[in-house]
Amino acid sequence: VQPNNYSTFYDDQRQNWSIMFESEKAAMDFSKQVCIAKCNSSPVLESVLYQDLLLGEGQGVEGGDSLEVAYTGWLFQNNGLGQVFDSNVNKDKLLRLKLGSGKVIKGWEEGMMGMKKGGRRYLIIPPALAYGAQGVAGRVPPDSTLVFEVEVRRVKLAKECSGSDGLSVSSRDSPAPSPVPSSDGFSAD
């Protein structure tokens, strides 16, 4: 995915191609279908498949960074999108998470690495990196593959959470800098 509704790819002869789409939506829809096709053509899905839809700006996020995210989650059924089982897109509250904290499913932790503020990505997550054999009662059946469209709305890099002298404000035994316990690193705006 490139700026201005372009996508570039290469074929099996390593020939480079570019496609320009007439709209951002057309480019995103195509990218989603590419991701679904990759999933359907892999014999066993063992890792997270992801496809950028919009690149976003700034530095890519890594473990320890805090994000605010808008998302929609679907069940992957009959080789495509099934029903929506969760979304916060039309709600006032964004999901806040800290990458690497283990508070969200493993597939999110892996699939969101490198995303940038304003970026959108499509994730297809195998059951082992989602809710596994237990599922979520009434919402996600056991052993479900999940599809998410995630958009990073705000980012707070772990590196920005240090004191003015450049030293980390985290406790000494913690290998990664972290925000002061009373604050999650986001300003009140």
Image: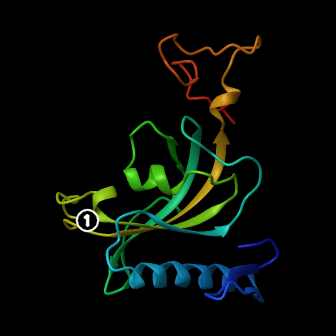
Q: Nearer the viewer, residue 35 or 179?
A: 35
Q: Residue at the spot x=39%, y=79% of the render?
A: 42
Q: Residue at the spot x=61%, y=14% of the render?
A: 169
Q: Is residue 22 above or below residue 53?
A: below
Q: For mark 1, give the secondary structure.
A: loop
Residue 130 appears in the rendering: no
Callout 1: few (<14), some (14-19), or many (20+) C-alpha neighbours within 10 Å? Answer: many
Q: Nearer the viewer, residue 155 or 79?
A: 79
Image location of residue 56, percent across then percent down? 72, 59
Locate residue 97 relative to residue 46 in the image: left or right. right
Quarter of the image holding residue 62?
top right
Image location of residue 40, percent across then percent down? 39, 84
Figure label count:
1
Q: Residue at the spot x=64%, y=87% of the render?
A: 11
Q: Is residue 21 above or below residue 103?
A: below
Q: Residue furthest right?
A: 4
- Residue flagged by tag 1: what amino acid is it? Val
Q: Is residue 121 above or below residue 108?
A: below
Q: Residue at the spot x=22%, y=60% of the render?
A: 135
Quarter of the image holding residue 161?
top right
Q: Which residue is mark 1?
A: 140
